[in-house]
Image: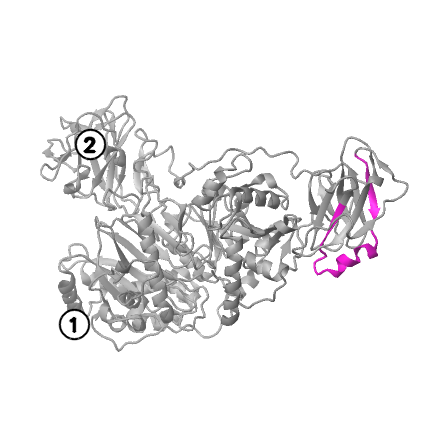
Amino acid sequence: MSLALGVGCSGETRLPTEENPPETRVCDFELPVAAAPAPSGDLRINEVMTGNDGAWVDEVGETDDFIELMNIGQRALDLGEYALSDKSGKATRLPKLTLGPGRTALFWADDTPEQGPLHLPFKLSNSGARVALWSSSCQLADLVNVPELPRSESYARLPDGTGEPSICRYATPERENGETCGPPDPPNLDDSIRFAPFPWPEPFPAIAGPLVISELSLRPAGFVEVLNASGAPVALDGFALRLAALSPGQAPPGADAGVLLAWPEPSVTLAPGERVSVPVGASDTAELEASPDFEGVATLWREDSPEPSDRIDFMAWPEGAPLARVPDATGAPRFCAAASPGAPNEGCAELPGRELASGRAHRLETAADFAELAEGGTAVGELGVKFVVDMAANDTVHLLSTRTWALHYTFVREQIRKEPHLDRCDPAQAAEFNVGWGVFSQTEYFRAEGRRYLLGTLVEHTNGAKTVEFSPGDQIVGEQMRRAFFAAMKAVPDPEAWAIRPTEGRQILELRAIEGTAPIVGPNAPYKGLTYQSLNPAEGFGTLTFVPARDLETAELGPNVIVVTDDVPNETAFMGGLITEAFQTPLAHVNVLARGRGTPNMALRGARDDARLKALFGKLVRLEVRASDFDIREATAQEADAYWEKRKPTGARLSPALDRSVRGVVPLDAAGYAMGDSIGSKAAGMAELYRVSGVGQYCPLDLLPLYVPPAAFAIPFSHYMDHFEASGAAELLAELEQDPEFRADPHAHAEGLAEVRARMLAHPVDPAILSEVTGAIDQRFGGDRVRLRSSSNTEDLATFNGAGLHTSTSGDLDAESSSIEDALRTVWASLWNTRAYDEREFGHVEQARAAMAVLVHQAWQSERAQGVAISRNALDATRDSQYYINAQIGEASVTNPAPGVTSDEIVYTPPPRTIKAEYLTRSSLSRGRDVLSFPEVQRLGCVLESVHAHYRPLVDPKGENRLYAMQIEWKLIGPERRLLVKQARPYSFGTLEAPGDCREY
């Protein structure tokens, strides 16, 4: 227990139990009325939280308030000699634990001492509290006057133990507070898988020499320059220079193939470092010009050797540009703006880019080649370029365009085998394609011997890592991975920046056999040292403005503001783009909103001080968030105006379905998805969960029936509409929408909507429906606390997601904290939150038809874990064979996390593919443990499979949504960790469009 709770224990420890609870004793001394006196002794109150909403969890997963103590002395202390209190005259004796020097102990102020010795018999007021630490003689050892704190922010000594307490947005229980308040680094992923280093040979790749081809100018026909890279004179009459055309799948031509270029006279011998330009005429390049991609090879043959002295293959040659080695003798070929015959190539001004008409290249030869080939990918956080190494063609490398070639097989089929293109969107042709793909996979993936091709991907990651990767399940062996790696490295200008990255356990074992003979990194290399995170790739224009996260909810923003903020906000006004200094989860509400709006969203550590942003604050900028990087620059008013004009909604407004005929409590086990027009999408989605009946081939039969909130019911739209109209809120809103000031003035707009909500909150709920609701709660849930959740008709529309805009709350029949009537009015009124109204307006939704139903079910407490999962890879939308999971320990939210808190982020590949759970980030609350066991991940995957299949004919009856996916919210309940599914709804990829060739797999 001491290790798990961060308490330094030694010697015999007597802990209070349920039969022997913590002792409460009376102290005669009153707490000082004035400011807190200076602490005495070595035990200090180090950190206090009075409104924990997911900043830390106790041993049963509850997000209770806490008090952290620290021993600042040089000797161990017996905590049993101290007591804690939040009021005069009464203090709780601490358990007999030994706290070592510099160690901290965390106590939970949750008024549940029966939960254990670290749980106190009192709570702290979130409007302010006085926390006192008493010695055994009732002497005041420390006193902290805690002010009212924002939710999940703490009152902490900075630095630990000795500093004056101050409000800090980032709580640090069981961790160092630091010198200043700042966002914590995310937990590191396991870096224990390491490989022996590899010393790169110089140069790489080695050129046989002694003569090398240093420059070619072939479009239009001009010259080929040959350089003597050796230290001795070389006679040209022992060498032959040839040009030959190539095509995919063809082995490099032999010494007699192609056009022989004549050495110029009187050049007979080249001195060391001397070069000669060999003229090339139009007839010499005629065959190259006739090929579709000007694809060919220049080879310098040595008559006394079967291997060439040098060879450069080429394709997609830009008109007027020479191809030159930079530097001359050893560098990689690059396309330059101007030729330099007879002179060194160091002055090459590289072309910024070129057209790759056929969607492939042999090498990266301009700065934009990689990005051009990667264009069209749907992965977030990385850029990938597939490559094929053709071992039957002397390891010729083909770098493939993601947009053109969905699969390695597609390229091989059409370009090497010359088989006709098949339309995978046509069922018959797709079936034929899949048969061929299956046969190809048997020889080129599922066995190592007898294959012709080595198939991999060059991946550039957000953290700057560059890796060569092979698909999980590919039976490639270590020697083949090394062969593919070095072949691919001849196609990149910076080979020493790259390394092989294993993508599954079998590959790790294979690479152990070759470690030290190639550069290899561990599986988690892409996730270390991250400073940038792409959340929603998009373009936006606006004035770059810094706003602290705690001010975002009330700040005057708008679609013409690009916001930089210090944390991940849970509530924000409408904005044109977002840059957070803390990392987000893709399922955070702010990212859901960004996807719905089509606005850029990214995270960048230290954004305020980043040189790329610092000079642009207060200026109109263009921000483009891309998969693995971003671009920001000053913009002109003209291009911004054109962008905003293009974004204005046109056509008829979205008209939400609204059926007012359904009245009274609606039991969800008697409802279904079709009732969304009367009980809202959230309630209808839960109702359908009761009906899920299919189990996947690789899943256990005991998966069904799904465990969903029992006895849940809904309060339909009709009662909301009655209240909306009877309260006068409907009439007021109609008046406001005719007022030009309401439309134009943000203050008037917000105040008007606040008055709409105020009328709804003040008006009594109709006694008849209130009596029916409270009766249903009493009958179904007894004295248990219940959740009242928003379920509007403006969520999950075809082009408007609407998630995270409304308020859900809890209620009690005994009205100890919140009455059912208050809770019901709170949910109803939240339909007119300013942010909800503005998002609907931007989404071109008809405001007058917006309505709110309420979903009612048991409020779960002490859950062991909870989270959100998607039945498709949310980070790579074409991967419908993978699932995306966010998981967090206890009650802490993954969609509205506390400041600085991260969750487990998992991409799970279920059978029949190679089963794998890849962790992208780790929970900052789980104390280094997995939130989910692997069997729990598998079971969650099975639930996703069943939900995905069941809802498809309901959500996408015509099968038109190629990126169809379902999102579920789930919990693990009780000590047995039973999987509860509490919500199912369609998942939206926002403005992302599916590729047009049905490439999903």
Residue found 13% across the figure and 31% down from its top: 29
In the displayed structure image, the side of residue 228 where residue 714 appears, left or right: left
Q: Read off the residue under disc 1.
A: 768
Q: Is residue 590 above or below residue 208?
A: below
Q: Read off the residue under disc 2.
A: 133
Q: Is residue 488 above or below residue 995?
A: above
In the displayed structure image, the side of residue 89 where residue 172 appears, left or right: right
Of all residues, the one furthest to the top in this rendering is: 74
In the displayed structure image, the side of residue 921 where residue 649 appears, left or right: right
Magenta-span inclusion, residue 95: no
Residue 189 visible at all: yes
The x, y position of residue 991, in whole percent, is 48, 63
Q: How is the image coloured?
A: one colour
The x, y position of residue 635, in whole percent, is 58, 54
Callout 1, which amino acid?
Ala
Q: Which residues are magenta?
A: 273-299
The front one of 556 and 454 is 454
Q: Is residue 821 above or below residue 861?
A: below
Q: Please tell me how many numbered marks the rendered image carries.
A: 2
* Mark identifier at residue 930: none
Of all residues, the one furthest to the bottom in this rendering is: 661
Quadrant (top left, top right, bottom left, bottom right) of the N terminus: top left
Of all residues, the one furthest to the right in this rendering is: 266
The front one of 552 and 458 is 458
The residue tagged with tag 2: helix, strand or loop? strand
